[in-house]
């Protein structure tokens, strides 16, 4: 896999960016601290994601962690000790902006979860479009055990994903789930053997790459923007997204390719 920096400035080694064809892998690369989300790590992730969003040939982004032990232990609790309340608020703003950048990313974002995925990093994963785990995964929003609550959308996104009853039980207990339990609750969509995580993610990315880039972006937006709204509004949101693809060159190419019995060559416009 080619290792390239997509951004103009180095990310101080905290986030590794690798390209495998049209897929960009973003690896939290601070294994000595269980890939904890320091302020610098969050800034680096935001920077790299913003740079990738400018690249039209990126068909999927994968978020994962280095070291094989943890996706991430969540917020950097050692750094947090010395932060003022205002600095903590600023950190929450930055982490929240990162979750929104994931949610609004023009291509699908996949969280590839191996080992511990706790607190803030699970909030990032909840903002991703697809979550895959390996058998070593341990997932939890354990903030209440630190006397705080999830502060980057976790209370809202977990309820939307798994329902209010499940979200309350998991957030109020701060319980860590193993991969099988996470799969049962719909928190992840697939669990594979540890050695199979990368190939399984690559297989999904290959499927995603068969879709039109504009269609993927609008399908993602239609689902996210309609969810939880009254049905007439939700259907109007879907129609607005359909309008974008209706006038696109990709839509014409898709129909032409079908008629000519060939694979479409989408341009993302
Ligand atoms: N912030 C900062 N540093 C952290 C951290 C965090 N959230 N979690 C772990 N670390 C550090 C450890 O202190 C340790 O550093 P040290 O070697 O200087 O002592 C290093 O990362 C490795 O952690 P360790 O616990 O030895 O590794 P492990 O593989 O046995 O366990 C975890 C990994 C993630 C399961 C475990 O560290 C853990 O449970 N961390 C707390 C997670 C947490 O509560 N996060 C907040 C959620 S709201």
Image: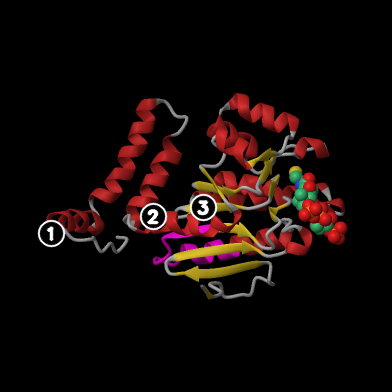
Q: Which mark is residue 208?
A: 2
Between residues 123 and 110, which one lies in front from this camera angle?
Answer: 110
Secondary structure found at label 2:
helix
Q: Say few, some or many: other residues with alpha carbon within 10 Å of mark 3 (under 14 / 14 to 19 / 20 or more).
A: many
Q: Is residue 70 above or below residue 24?
A: above
Residue at mark 2 to residue at mark 1: CA–CA distance:
22 Å
Label 2 within 8 A of ligand 1 by Cβ: no
Q: Quadrant of residue 144?
A: top right
Residue stretch rendered in magenta on the structure: 47-62
Magenta stretch contains residue 56: yes
Q: Position of residue 8 (x, y in %)?
A: 57, 75
Q: Is residue 219 above or below residue 106?
A: above
Residue 63 as seen in the image, left or right of residue 104:
right
Q: Residue at x 74, y 30 (%)?
A: 173
Q: Residue at x 36, y 37 (%)?
A: 237
**Sequence-wise, which precedes: disc 1 or disc 3?**
3
Between residues 150 and 175, which one lies in front from this camera angle?
Answer: 175
């Amino acid at each position: 896999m080619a290792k390239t920096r997509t951004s103009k400035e180095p990310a101080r080694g905290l986030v590794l960016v690798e390209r495998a064809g049209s897929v960009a892998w973003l690896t939290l690369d601070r294994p000595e601290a269980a890939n904890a989300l320091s302020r610098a790590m969050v800034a680096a992730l935001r920077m790299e994601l913003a740079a990738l969003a400018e690249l039209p040939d990126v068909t999927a982004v994968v978020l994962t962690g280095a070291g094989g032990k943890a996706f991430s232990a969540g917020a950097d609790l050692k750094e947090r000790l010395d932060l003022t309340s205002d600095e903590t608020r600023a950190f929450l703003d930055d982490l929240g902006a990162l979750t929104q950048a994931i949610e609004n990313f023009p291509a699908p974002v996949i969280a590839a979860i191996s080992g511990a995925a706790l607190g803030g990093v699970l909030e990032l994963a909840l903002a991703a479009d697809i979550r895959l785990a390996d058998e070593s995964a341990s997932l939890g929003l354990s903030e209440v055990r630190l006397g705080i609550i999830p502060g980057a959308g976790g209370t809202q996104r977990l309820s939307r994903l798994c329902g209010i009853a499940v979200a309350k039980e998991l957030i109020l207990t701060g319980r860590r789930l193993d991969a099988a339990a996470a799969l049962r609750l719909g928190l992840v969509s697939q669990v594979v053997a540890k050695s199979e995580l990368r190939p399984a993610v690559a297989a999904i990315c290959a499927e995603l790459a068969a879709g039109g880039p504009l269609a993927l972006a609008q399908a993602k937006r239609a689902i996210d923007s309609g969810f939880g709204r009254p049905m007439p509004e939700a259907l109007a949101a879907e129609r607005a997204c359909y309008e974008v693809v209706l006038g696109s060159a990709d839509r014409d190419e898709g129909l032409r390719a079908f008629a000519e019995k060939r694979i479409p060559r989408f341009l993302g416009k």
